[in-house]
Image: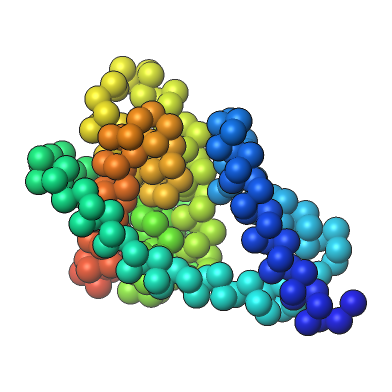
Amino acid sequence: MSQSMLAIVSLAFTLSCYFLIKQLYLKKRVWWLAPILMVPVIIVLFVISLNIPLPAYFEYTHWLMALLAPATIAFSVPIYRERKLIFSYPLTIGFGVVTGLLLGLLSSWGLTQIFSLPPELSHSTLVRSVSTPFAMEATSAFGGVPELTAMLVLLTGIIGMLVSEPLFKLAKINSPLAIGAALGAAAHGAGAAKASEFGKEEGVVASLTMIFTGIAMVLGAPFFSIFLV
């Protein structure tokens, strides 16, 4: 099979896999079927089993990464749509943004100090707690590698999604606003998806917190890099 054909098959498989797993997850609602977890596993197995060279896989699928730019702009839609909620709970959302941003940065910096990590990995880790479009934009200020940052963001989201519910039960956190703000600030897109399982209000707050935290990271990255790099 030619490289162009492999590239077409890879793109078709990636898109089909995502939509099928997403539909299955919406029906079953079990954590291990979450697209953010299951789709990468299936794609890795697909690439390895068919021995597809990475240049062939990314020949057309790299356009999916290019969609991150318009996806970032599209974040303005929920901000406008949920403006009443923003004005109703400005302190909750604002505190969630500030707390999530600082704790995410400081915890990541702490990990780089505890473990002896290569500079590229260390710098890419710092922005792992914000959504992928914002993280890939902000990581350059810290000297990180965008592709490596995206992988760390994915891992952070998966872990946050998995541990959130047990932690909320352990800490006896029942407030929809607290649950939404915590998940949006700590686990970005995966956290927002998990928050939606708790309820509509939790999902909205998580989405807004995720967006504002990402914006704050992009704007503050040049300043934070002075102290953390």
Task: Classify residue 219 by image quadrant.
Answer: bottom left
Q: For this view, does 105 lie left or right of residue 31? A: left
Task: Classify residue 53 by image quadrant.
Answer: bottom right
Say whether residue 119 is visible. Answer: no
Number of numbered tags placed on the structure image: 0
Q: Position of residue 94 (x, y in %)?
A: 15, 47
Q: For this view, does 35 lie left or right of residue 187? A: right
Q: Position of residue 59 (x, y in %)?
A: 68, 79
Q: For this view, does 77 lie left or right of residue 69? A: left
Image quarter in which the C terminus is found: bottom left
How is the structure coloured here? rainbow
Q: Nearer the viewer, residue 226 or 176?
A: 176
Q: Position of residue 114 (x, y in %)?
A: 43, 49
Q: Nearer the viewer, residue 137 or 4?
A: 4
Residue 192 vertical position relative to residue 130 in the rendered view, above or below: above
The structure residue drawn at horizontal position 54% and vertical position 59%, both measured from the top left corner, is 151
The structure residue drawn at horizontal position 41% and vertical position 72%, both measured from the top left corner, is 69
Q: Nearer the viewer, residue 209 or 88?
A: 88
Q: Nearer the viewer, residue 72 or 52?
A: 72
Q: Position of residue 200 (x, y in %)?
A: 33, 34
Say whether residue 132 is visible. Answer: yes
The structure residue drawn at horizontal position 85% and vertical position 58%, both measured from the top left corner, is 49
Image quarter in which the N terminus is found: bottom right
The structure residue drawn at horizontal position 56% and vertical position 31%, both measured from the top left corner, is 29
